[in-house]
Amino acid sequence: MIHLTQTELYNGLEAIGYPVAYSHFKSEPKAPYLVYLFAYDNDFMADNVNYAEIPNFQVELYTEKKDPVAEEKVKAKLKEMQLPYNRTETYLESENMFQMVFTIQLIGG
């Protein structure tokens, strides 16, 4: 876990070269593209005080077909930014797309 702001996260994801938006796009871009959003917090608390904010974010990669190259680009960027991640993959039948979700934590972000 590293101290990183949402702006720094956005800038890092944008550097991958795919369209990026918080939560959603007004009009869906051509895949592959990335969406990131706050998922939940895991704050450190003691004595009824939140001592350290630890927000968990989802970085979602959308592709039209299984795309190991796009996945590797996202994984490499998260590693470069020193952001450990967990990931899951889902095929969205209604969208006819793959969704790879990377869950990360930003301390104080």
Image (cartoon, helix red, strand yellow):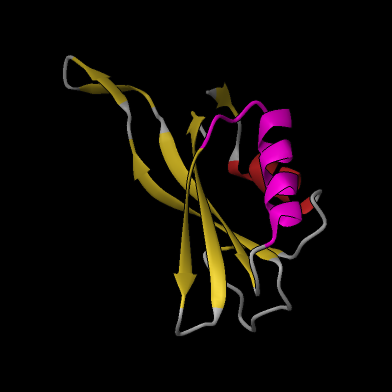
Q: Given the current orientation, which residue lies at the most extreme top position?
A: 47
Q: Which residue is drawn at 55% across and 68% down?
A: 98
Q: Is residue 29 left or right of residue 92?
A: right
Q: In this view, does 24 lie to the left or right of 32?
A: left
Q: Is residue 84 magenta?
A: yes
Q: Position of residue 79 (x, y in %)?
A: 68, 30
Above or below, 94 relative to 101: below
Q: Position of residue 102 (x, y in %)?
A: 52, 47
Above or below, 80 relative to 25: above
Residue 9, by quadrant, is top right
What residue range appears in magenta? 67-85
Above or below, 23 relative to 106: below
Q: How many callouts does the rendering have?
A: 0
Q: Residue at x 74, y 78 (%)?
A: 30
Q: Given the current orientation, which residue lies at the most extreme left position?
A: 48
Q: Is residue 28 left or right of residue 23?
A: right
